[in-house]
Amino acid sequence: MPFELRFVYAMTAFAALAGVLSVAGIYYQDSAQSRTHAEAMTGGSVAAGKAAIGRYNCGACHRIPGIGAATGVAGPALNGIATRSFIAGTLPNDSPNLQRWLQHPQQVVPGNAMPEQGVTPRDARDIAAYLYTLRR
C-alpha cells in the first residue's frame, strides 16, 4: 500500500476518533451540568435519589431511564420529566410541587393511581434531583 494511502487512512481514523471523543466529552459535560443544576434546584442528591427510587420500588409502575429494573407501565414513563410543564396534569413542574407530589400524591389528586409511599422529605428532595436530570 502506498505511503500516501496509508497516511489518508490514518488521518481518517484519527478524525473519526477525535469526533467520537468530542461527542463523549460533550455528553459528559452536559450530564455533569444537568446533575449540578438538579441538585442546586432541589437541595437533593442525584445519586441518593437514584437509590431511593429503587428502595421505594418506583419502577414497578414507571419506566425510568437509568434505573435498570424500572420497566413498569401502570404509571407514565418518566423520561423527559424535567422538561414537562405539569406534574400529574395539575401542578406546575417546579421543585416544591414535585416534592409535594412525591410525598403526598393522594392529597394533590385524590383517588389517582399513585399510592402514598411514606416518602420522607429528604428522599423527596433526592428523588426530585434525580428526576430533574431526565431531560430526554
Image (cartoon, rainbow, N blue to C red):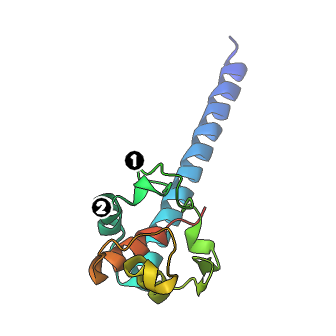
Question: Which residue is the site of mark 2?
Answer: 51
Say what amino acid the circle numbered 2 marks: Ala
Q: Which mark is residue 69?
A: 1
* Residues at marks 2 and 1 touching, judged by CB atoms closer than 8 Å: no
Which of discs 2 and 1 lies nearer the camera? The answer is 1
Q: Nearer the viewer, residue 77 or 41?
A: 77
Tell me what residue is drawn at x 61 percent, y 84 percent.
90
Quadrant of the drawing holding the C terminus: bottom right
Q: Position of residue 65 (x, y in %)?
A: 49, 55
Q: Position of residue 55 (x, y in %)?
A: 28, 60
Residue most extreme to the front: 111
Crowdedness near tag 1: few (<14), some (14–19) or many (≥20) residues, C-alpha within 10 Å? some
Say what amino acid the circle numbered 1 marks: Ala
The answer to whether 26 appears left or right of 44 in the picture is right
Tell me what residue is drawn at x 35 percent, y 78 percent.
124
- Above or below, 127 against 71 in this view is below
Quadrant of the drawing holding the N terminus: top right
Q: Position of residue 82 (x, y in %)?
A: 56, 72
Mark 2 or mark 1, which has the lower sequence index? Answer: 2
Residue 87: quadrant of the picture: bottom right
Q: Secondary structure under badge 2? A: helix
Q: Secondary structure under badge 1? A: loop
Tell me what residue is drawn at x 41 percent, y 47 percent.
68
Q: CA distance from mark 2 to mark 1?
A: 12 Å
Q: Nearer the viewer, residue 34 or 105?
A: 105
